[in-house]
Image (tube, rainbow, N blue to C red):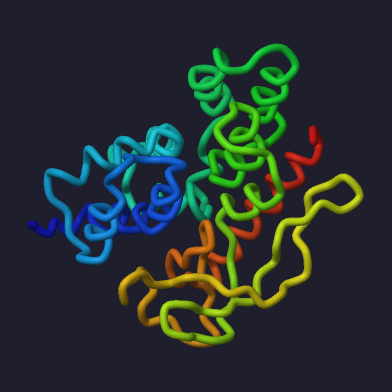
Amino acid sequence: MIETAPQLAGILRFIRYGFMANRLSYCGPLGENQTLFEYGIERVQDGGLAPLLQRFTGALPYLQLIAHANGLADPFDTRVVEAYWLGNELLERVEVRQLYDSLVQRFSKQLQGRTRDLVLGKAPAGARPHHSFHVLDIHSRVGELGHSLHTLDHCRVSWGSVQQVEGAEVVVQRQALVLREGKLVLDAARPERVVRQLDGHGFADHVTVGDWVSLHWGWVCEVVTERQRAQLERYTRHHLALANQTI
């Protein structure tokens, strides 16, 4: 494999977040999880990686939309990947019409009647092309995932403060998604055990107590900065409020 540094950072970040969902067969290329993991661990890319990433058909259109709206050629630019999974200023430059047209193109044939109107109406209501929007307002309506609290909570990217590091696992303080008085809210932070390594390797091998980490399907994706954590919380809460309008 040959390392190509200019594009590598965004691709590696995408693998960190897509890996566990792919392992659970929710998205991306089936049967290629070990290969994807090896690319992420070895921190390299070659001609075989791009076709794998193109098969993440749930996330890729959002990346393409964010990149286009910001005048960026590469949907795997690290700023674009960060915008989708965590959140940053690139999301604010996606115009309402651009998101609306993208939703129409992708989902209008899968949705009917009131459900279609609800989904398409999220763009003018303030939705951004962030993973939390897709989880909370798209996934369950198009039949990709069940609509259980457990599914929504673990499919969304969340954040946690590391309290203990115990081999392949870490204990984090994390806010779970709960249903309270008919609305989705983040509960008080509680200890939760999550996985950071498989066979001695992971994407956060050097995590230490006190670090903030991002989590997807019970897997530690990466250590994040306070700015990244705050952006993730901001967009998560924004899309929770938006989802609660039509729950």
Q: Position of residue 57 (x, y in %)?
A: 39, 33
Which residue does the image show at 52% across and 26% down from the upper left? 98
Q: Nearer the viewer, residue 124 or 158?
A: 158
Locate the N terminus by quadrant.
bottom left
* Quarter occupied by residue 5: bottom left
Q: Is residue 208 above or below residue 193?
A: below
Residue 169 in the figure: left or right of residue 202: right
Vertical comparison of 80 with 42: above or below: above
Q: Position of residue 59 (x, y in %)?
A: 44, 39
- Residue drawn 71% across and 18% down? 117
Q: Is residue 226 left or right of residue 243?
A: left
Quarter of the image with the C terminus in it = top right
Q: Residue at x 55, y 31 (%)?
A: 95
Image coordinates for residue 39, horizontal then vertical, percent: 22, 58
**Quadrant of residue 69 within the rendered picture:** top left
Classify residue 180 as left or right of residue 218: right
